[in-house]
Image: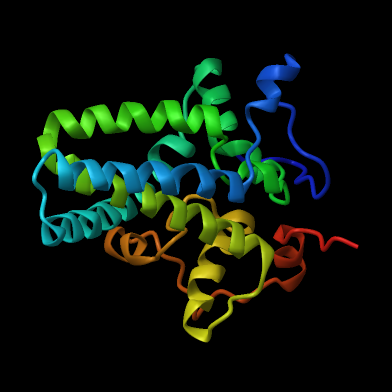
Amino acid sequence: MKFEKINNKGQARLFTNPYLEMLTKGNPWIIWGMYIPILSYVIYLGYTDFNLTVQNSFFLFLGGILFWTFFEYIAHRYIFHLISEKRSLQRFAYIMHGNHHHYPRDKQRLFMPPVPSIILASIIFIIQYLVLGKWVFGFFPGFMFGYLLYASMHYAIHAIAPPFKFMKPLWRNHHLHHYKEENLGFGVSNTFWDRVFGTMFDLAKEKEDKQKVKELMFEKEE
């Protein structure tokens, strides 16, 4: 997924159909505003209709968040950076993630857009329900909340400098993933799984290229 030219302005055109193209764009506030009521209701159903206790719900929610971090790593490494000779799979990888590497300043494609997001979340809920049964009403909200935190962290990494010193390795790991080596640094919300699976950059040896980092950051609005 290496590109000869990284575009610092504009965004990729994913579909010729304007309506399909519109469905590929999302806004962080819309996604948060859409999911928080849905996830709250799912937790409520677990408590009222499936006899999940507050303690059950809390630990399932926490487990869902933790499982998301692993899912995030696997999806980023093996799906978003899918390598295939088939053009259909190459296009799939570009739509899902490659366009972000090509146009890293595109703010509208860091959160999955509402319609595809709801469809995919529904499929994930069904799969988790088949595996977990009633426990999904605590686990699924945590899993999706983990996604919201991940997408928000990804947005922040391209928008601002790390707000705290301890977060700088996370910022640098992702920046290096963009401009140094895309086969390392798959963690976005955390670096834990990169460290576990040996795909973490050696930050002590990597000199920061401030110009390239600047090119990955959103342009400040006038």
Question: Is 111 positioned to the left or the right of 218 in the image?
Answer: left
- The residue lying at 76 percent from left, 60 percent from top is 215
Residue 20 visible in image: yes
- Work out whether 206 lies above or below 85: below
Near-viewer residue (220 or 105) = 220
Q: Is residue 154 left or right of residue 59?
A: right
Residue at 25%, 47% (x, y): give it.
43
Q: Is residue 200 left or right of residue 109?
A: left
Location of residue 120 (image quadrant): top left
The total number of labels drawn is 0
* Residue positioned most to the bottom: 165
Image x and y of residue 188, in percent: 47, 58
Residue 136 in percent (x, y) is at 19, 40
Please tell me in which quadrant of the rendered image residue 163 appears: bottom right
Residue 185 visible in this rendered orientation of the protein: no
68 left or right, relative to 220: left
Task: Look at the image and name its color scheme.
Answer: rainbow
Report the quarter where the N terminus lies: top right
Q: What residue appears at the point 63 percent right and 26 percent down from the top-left corner?
A: 23
Q: Residue furthest right?
A: 222
Residue 119 place in picture, x, y as percent: 43, 25
Q: Is residue 201 above or below residue 105?
A: below
Q: Nearer the viewer, residue 92 or 120?
A: 120
User: How far across and down, in percent of the image, does residue 147 sit?
Assistant: 41, 49
Quadrant where the C terminus is found in the figure: bottom right
